[in-house]
Image: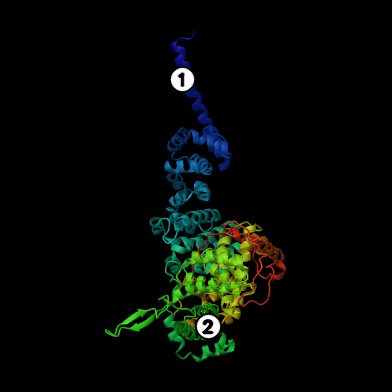
Amino acid sequence: MPGPGSHKKSKSKAPRSQENVRQIRMAEIDNAEGWNAIVTLLCDLFQLPDLTSRTGLKQVHTKFNTVFAKIEDVYQRNPQNYKLRGGIIGIFAKMCVDSLLRDKLFEKGVLGMITPLLEIDDTRHLALRCLSTITHHGGSNVRIEIAKYANVLAKLVRNLPDDEKVAELAVSTLAHSITAVTDGFPIPASPAVLKSIDMVEVLKSALEAVKRYHSDPLSLIDHAIELVCMSSMHTLNAFKAYPPAINFMIAGLRSKDWVTRATCLGGMLRLYQSEAEENPRIFDTRKLLTSIRRRIPDHLIDLQTDYGFARCEFYLLAKASGEFPKAMMACVQTHDFHALGLKLVELILAAEFSVVEGTFDAEDPVTGKRLNDNAGLPFKMWSESLPFCAQVIRKLGKPNEADIADILDLKYLIMTQRIPDAVALAKKCIERNPQQAYFHYAITLAADNVQGLRAAKKGLKCKLLTPFVKWQLTQRAVIHAADMGVKILQDMPDVGDKRWEEGIAFLSSACEDAKSFLEGAPPDNRYMKDVGYWYILLSMLLKDDLSADLHELKPDLERLKAADEFSIFMGLPPPKTELRLAQQTAVKHYPAAIKEFSRVFDLLDKCKGEAGCTAPDQDKLEDDLAAWLGDMKLKDGTMQSVGARCPGNIGQAGDVRRLGIATVPVKSYIGEIIRRHANFKLER
């Protein structure tokens, strides 16, 4: 039986044995070539499981404190051994792929262990690769923490212009981290961190880097696009101070790669959100009516004459402004609410502000004060005549006047800003008569792009379609489709993926409808401006050939100028919306942008090849639309039959037995999957 001495001797052997192993491993690390070899040796030294497997990472998680303490001890005891410290950082980078381990490591201060290695030549690339990996897999909190070192990273790129790897990894880290800081609206996710970042230097260092020669520039340019475009919302002052950043986004509109184009357009649209004005939702109709009674400038009259003055909005509004009060006064005398309802619907389907709010005024014979009086009618406010007349018409029970009653109710809900109620009612109306375009128009007023675009496309194919409703549906189709297309492609779907095809489809459809609107709508249509903004931007995105001076877009820019003049004449100066500011900036900077950055995007296109630059086959997309139209589902999940019969009704041009595919001309690039894309907020 061994005595005490033997026991003590056996215990002393273990530490010496472990120390010998440690010394051997350290010597191997010192002599190792390449970081992979060093990390592998360290994993053996620390007896770590396989960090490339989920099982191995889970094992580390269960005994994290013990593992980290062991690794940290070696790190702290070897302050001058940069190979060892770099290898340890490499281990941490592998662990950071797991979100739970990543959070634990950051709680332990691992970022403070990585950043000192940025200043050392031998470990700089490894440290940058670790940061890039962590920001790629990290959550927003982790990326915001790394963004605190943005100025350090920008300085590295600027001071080491010949180091391609520094530029690639630093710009990648900047893109992933700063976009976490600038995320959010109306305020960024971390205002304090954003304030500490010198965004001018960040943008300048990244864009000067993309201009330099690189043997493999794809990652660098892609991350520069992400950095610039995804940070634009809350960094307008930096973009103004460094205009090449604006030029970079505008030049990107001409890339052959679809995702790049849409990402750059999204960056432009977000750029001015912090200082943009809102589009007014409610207009003073009295101001409009007063303006159209003044003399219209000769050059604007020429435009109206060429179009047909009786078809212009000024004429239609002036006509309605006379006929509406006349109809109300006739009702005071006759109390014929059926006739009033018929007249109101005629006006509603002809012009936007044909029915206005107001009351009958009377004078108090004693005091002389003006009093609101119902003039013997069962309502005081003029808008209240709409539901009252609808009720009277329904009581008469004439089948061919069912649409009239529904349109009156819908107009009342729209006038009183009860859009959700209007949408719900319109869906019920469509079940009865899918051929009445005004029902679809009511649905397009919803903020939901999916149902709005679907309704616009359906409405434009209806038999009961007046010119006013046609152009209302068209402008809503443009706005919904453009908004969806940009958002989908900004998510960077894989080339050939269904979402990639959808994004292209929506943008192409928006451009097609915008062109139709500009060429066909009245020149004084108040939506000519917004549709024109979209058409200019989408033309930059989609046109095959576009010269540096944009002379191909001159007719469309002239239309925009005239639309501005009509708007000013009507007492409604064009608001500086983000869309207007983006379009004006794109036109202004386009020549300089192409000169400065076209080579960069040509290089990017060459690196990405033809796959991402070719639009999906049009026939395939048209088949998708046919399938979508033939298999429509309502929002509540119930099926809506496309074979619904259309009863005789106002404005009907014959009996339409079914809304079938054979009767619908398929011209747009819309896929059947619109129903999958919901909840994209759009300003009405």
- Does residue 566 sit above or below 212 in this rendering? below
Residue placed most toward the observer, 432 or 255: 432
Quadrant of res 361: bottom left
The mark lying in front, picked from 1 and 2, is: 2
- Within 10 angstroms of label 2, few (less than 14), some, or many (20 or more) residues? many
- Within 10 angstroms of label 1, few (less than 14), some, or many (20 or more) residues? few
Left or right placement of residue 486 versus residue 361 in this view:
right
Disc 2: which residue: 313
Quadrant of res 674: bottom right
Answer with mark 1 or mark 2, whichever residue precedes in sequence: 1
Residue furthest out toward the top: 1
At numbered mark 1, what does the secondary structure look like: helix, strand or loop? helix
Residue placed most toward the observer, 45 or 478: 478
Which numbered disc covers residue 658? Answer: none
Left or right placement of residue 678 versus residue 241 in this view:
right
Labels 1 & 2 near each other (Cβ < 8 A): no
What's the residue type where badge 1 is placed?
Ser
What's the residue type where badge 2 is placed?
Glu
Residue 33 can be seen in this image: no
Residue 217 position in % (x across, y down): 59, 58
Residue 506 position in % (x across, y down): 61, 66
Between the C-alphas of marks 1 and 2, the distance is 99 Å
Quadrant of res 535: bottom right
Disc 1: which residue: 12
